[in-house]
Image (cartoon, grey):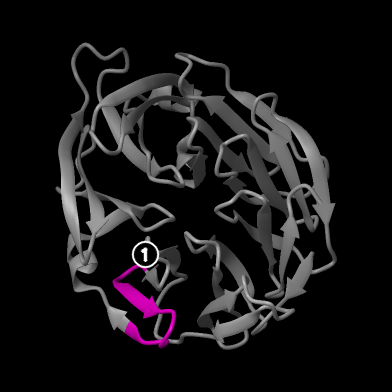
Amino acid sequence: MRVFTGHRFRLNTLVFSPDGRYLAASGADSSVLDRVVQLWDVAGETDPPHMIRERLRDLVHLPHLMFRPHGRQLLLWNGQCWKCLDVGTGQLTHEPELTSLQPRVVSSNGRWAVFRRDAEVSDSIHLSVSRWSENRWDEVWSRKFEAKASDEFGNRLFHAWHLDSSGGHVVVVSTPVDDAFRESGAAWVQVIETATGSDLFHWVGEFPLMASHAFISTSGQLAYLHQRRLRAVNLSVPNGELITRTNSSRKHFTAAAFSPDGKSLATTSNDTTVTMWDTATWQPIRQYGWEIGKLRAVAFAPDGLTCAAGSDTGKVVLFDVDG
């Protein structure tokens, strides 16, 4: 277990490079209202890990982070434009292609992106999926999703879509326009294979608008957090049961991440702990705790053997999952 820090800031995102060498974090410095991005070489021999990029100021909003597949560049979406940080040189450049295409979701390994191609319409959505190849994005498929008269919900409002961590699944979530259905929390969830655009399965059940904060596993499990509640469902089981678990403390959950094999889910909480859940039973496996502040983010290394958790003090703990 290693604890390290750089600039003191409220950390909100952690992401490993595809090869596990680098760990990137983003957050905000409340003292100067500055947005912060930091990058560590966690595969090096130094303890604490060597920080190779300390902070960036040219950001409007808290950035979303993901690495290119080769791991040498870090992509940042700050709510207005895409930028690319070169790990070796520290050069920050604009990404005009990504900015013009305006992808709504990019996989954490930087290989897949989902784009919304038309203006927002309540009962339809036009998505396209592209794959990063060499130095450009190549569209793989484009598809329009819309409500049909035969649907049990009738008209639907499309409000969320996601990629799993590897980008293997696209998940589209919509809710009925009808007020009675919407108040019940009913929703329609469709899972599409990213590489082909073909339907894998769909699921109907309770799935409130908190779906925008959902987490998808490579095995088709879906989980989302709301205050002290963890809810999960296996999307491959039609009309499958929605599992609900409550945090063991009175504090709210703050973040979650699936392991690469989808067999575990790590959650962080304001009670300074990380809890590992078995996704087959949705029972806690073990709990870790450190006095580094309220935990705000968590991420698995690509090998699934190491995990990182970050706090509101800017401190990060790197620990062995089975340790």
Q: Is residue 77 something that shows in the picture?
A: no
Residue 217 % position (x, y): 51, 38
- Classify residue 172 as left or right of residue 184: left
Which residue is located at x 67 percent, y 55 percent? 306
Which residue is located at x 51 percent, y 42 percent? 215
Which residue is located at x 66 percent, y 28 percent? 244
Residue 205 % position (x, y): 47, 20
Q: Which residue is mark 1?
A: 68
Q: Nearer the viewer, residue 3 or 322?
A: 322
- Stretch of the chain drawn in magenta: 79-92
Residue 104 % position (x, y): 31, 54
Name, please, the residue furthest toward the front. Answer: 45
For label 1, the SS is: loop
Which residue is located at x 23 percent, y 65 percent? 98
Q: On screen, 4 above or below 235? A: below
Q: Nearer the viewer, residue 197 or 44?
A: 44
Residue 89 % position (x, y): 40, 88
Q: Give amino acid for label 1.
A: Arg
Q: Is residue 84 magenta?
A: yes
Quarter of the picture containing the N terminus is: bottom right
Q: Nearer the viewer, residue 46 or 308?
A: 46
Q: Quadrant of residue 279?
A: top right
Q: Quadrant of residue 171?
A: top left
- Classify residue 1 as left or right of residue 223: right
- Classify residue 202 as left or right of residue 50: left
Q: How many marks?
A: 1
